[in-house]
Structure formats: C-alpha cells, structure tokens
C-alpha cells in the first residue's frame, strides 16, 4: 500500500468526477473502493458514472452500488439542473463493463479487511454511511475519520434551499444520524467550498496537456457556466476540496464544533446547525473546515490532473 487508505462515497456528479480524478492522481491516498449513492442523479447513473470514471482514471478498485434514495419516506432529490441529465454535464464516457457489487457490504468489508485505519470521504448524501452505522456499527467505529462534504455554517446560505446544502437536504435524517454517531468527522461545508473557486485560468498545466482528462474538465467547467452556476467562469470545487483534505489536511484550518442537522423542519430540512458556543450539552463532534489555502488547492488540482492527463493519454 502506498498512501492513506480511503473509500469514496459519491453521487457523480460533475464535481464528484473531479474529486475522483484528484484522488486517483494523488499518491498520498490509496482508493480502496468507490460506493455510488443516489443524489445528483439516480443510482443507475451515479453507479454507471462511478465505474466509467474509475476506468478513465485507471483505478482498479471495486465499485459498489449503494442506496437508491434517502432513509424513511422522503422522496429522492436530484440536481440535474446543475449536473446535467447524465450527471456529467452531458459528457459521455465509454460505458464500463466492470462488475459492480452491493455497496453496503463492500463498505463494511473494505473497512474490516484494511490493515490500516480507513478514511471515508463522503461527497454525496449520507444514506450509505447512516445505514452502515445502523447495520454494522463496529465497522463504522473502525473508520479513522469521515471527511464529509456537506452543510455549512449558519451565515452561509444553502444551495438546495435557502437553509440547506444539497447533500444534507437530500437525506437530512442520514446526516443527523452520522453527526450523532461519535466517529471523528471533518466537515467540509459550503462556508469552506465557497472559497475553493477554480476556473480555466487556474489550470494552465492541465489546459496545455490537452488529453482526455483535460477535455472532460474543460467540458465540465463550460457546462457549469452554461447552466448558470459559474462564478465568473469559475466553479466551486465542493467535492474536490473534501478529497484534497484527505490528501493534505493542512489545506484547511479547522475548528472543533458541535454540528447537528435539522431532520424535520418545514423550511429548514437538511440545515446544518453549527454551534459556535461551548456548552456542556453540546460538546464538539466535528472539526469544521474554516479557511482554505486557495492558491495551494488550485496548484494541487492543476498539477495532479495534468500529470494524470499525461498518464491517461488521448
Ligand atoms: C454538493 O452537492 C452536489 O450537488 C455536489 O456534487 C456536492 O457534493 C454541494 O452542495
Ligand atoms: Ca457530490
């Protein structure tokens, strides 16, 4: 094994795709497996995209098919308006012929079989993780840390609703359960990912290399802009920032905070409630990402994806 063992739970998703590329390009992490969950698009598409992306970047790890929708009676949310009907902004990758396995048992078995403690990076709704905690709490407790892309501080508006970030809104009950469970969590929320803006001008090496990765990234950035979500040509790198924190935790500063997630509110379902007070009743249960070393993050993305592009070829 070369790097820190990680598992990625994901709903690709354009920024998920970039996150998977970054992980594959980084020797500091060893991707044990990828579990697809329903989120940005339906499970059939997120699992197909996860496998096709693993093929593209040369990741030989197993691909799991996780939950097809949120816990309880809640209806599945999607974000096709942001990620396109196929989840990749309309970009069509060659379909993967690799076999996929049931996601929850893959998650359990990878954690149990690892000789080193595993970090789980969650960049989709938290349904699979909440199910793992309910069905195999011993395995969930073996996880060294969950790096969770989701939520945000109360001063930052949501992106799915005025109050809620998409991953938490898509399954508020699961998110609330994960934060109540007690395993170490780093929360990479919108307050951090809003800082991680990346546009074509921040990726000079990748643009120059011009291979398949460069082409896909160029398409994703252009489609994001076309869909009206670009920030002056740049994109908020929500999911890549979570993977970057697994690669190099010093890219963000963190503060210990108590985090809970509203799982019932009529207007506020999925809202992360980050308590900045220190009260005996609400001890910190998460390390909240606060500031991002943006120049270093941009350089990491550019250099690593450019190297991957050279490896992957045209
Ligand atoms: C999160 O929601 C999804 O749409 C993105 O892929 C990311 O995981 C950002 O709120
Ligand atoms: Ca995602």
Image (cartoon, rainbow, N blue to C red):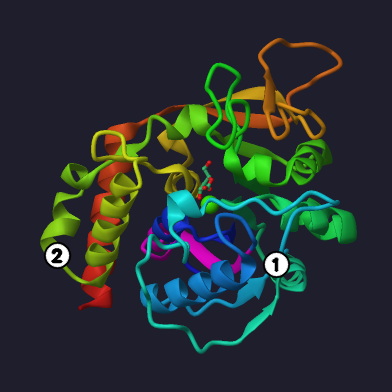
User: Is 183 in the magenta?
Assistant: no
Apparent side of residue 280 relative to residue 147 in the rendered image (left or right): right
x and y percent of residue 254 in the render? 54, 27
Q: Specify whether residue 253 is in view.
A: no
Which quadrant of the figure has residue 181?
top right
Q: Which residue bears the numbered disc 2?
A: 209
Q: Residue placed at 28% from the left, 76% from the top?
A: 312
Comparing labels 2 and 1, the label whose residue is closer to the camera = 1
Q: Quadrant of the C terminus?
A: bottom left
Q: Residue placed at 43% from the left, 71% from the top?
A: 53
Q: Residue placed at 38% from the left, 82% from the top?
A: 94
x and y percent of residue 108 in the render? 77, 67
Q: Which residue bears the numbered disc 1?
A: 66
Read off the magenta span: 21-36
Separation (CA) of disc 2 from disc 1: 35 Å
x and y percent of residue 97 in the render? 51, 89
Q: Would you say the beta carbon of the disc 2 residue lies within 8 angstroms of ligand 1?
A: no
């Amino acid at each position: 094994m070369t790097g820190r063992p990680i598992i990625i739970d994901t709903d690709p998703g354009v920024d998920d795709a970039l996150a998977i590329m970054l992980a594959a390009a980084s020797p500091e992490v060893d991707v044990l497996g990828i579990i697809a969950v329903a989120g940005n698009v339906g499970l059939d598409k997120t699992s197909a995209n996860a496998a096709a992306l693993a093929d593209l970047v040369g990741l030989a790890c197993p691909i799991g098919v996780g939950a097809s929708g949120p816990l309880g009676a809640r209806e599945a949310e999607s974000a096709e308006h942001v990620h396109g009907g196929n989840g990749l902004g309309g970009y069509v990758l060659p379909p993967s012929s690799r076999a996929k396995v049931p996601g929850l048992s893959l998650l359990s078995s990878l954690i149990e079989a690892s000789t080193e403690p595993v970090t789980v990076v969650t960049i989709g709704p938290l349904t699979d993780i909440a199910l793992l905690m309910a069905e195999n709490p011993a395995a969930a407790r073996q996880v060294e840390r969950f790096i969770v892309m989701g939520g945000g501080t109360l001063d930052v508006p949501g992106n799915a609703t005025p109050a809620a970030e998409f991953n938490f809104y898509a399954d508020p009950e699961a998110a609330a359960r994960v934060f109540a469970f007690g395993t170490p969590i780093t929360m990479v929320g919108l307050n951090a990912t809003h800082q991680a803006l990346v546009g074509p001008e921040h990726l000079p090496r990748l643009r120059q290399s011009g291979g398949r990765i460069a082409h896909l990234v160029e398409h994703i950035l252009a489609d994001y802009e076309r869909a009206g979500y670009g920030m002056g040509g740049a994109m908020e790198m929500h999911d890549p920032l979570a993977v970057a924190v697994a690669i190099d935790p010093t890219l963000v500063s963190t503060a210990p905070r108590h985090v809970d997630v509203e799982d019932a509110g009529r207007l506020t379902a999925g809202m992360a409630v980050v308590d900045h007070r220190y009260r005996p009743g609400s001890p910190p249960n998460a390390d909240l990402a606060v500031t991002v070393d943006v120049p270093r993050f941009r350089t990491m993305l550019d250099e690593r994806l450019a190297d991957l592009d050279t490896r992957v070829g045209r």
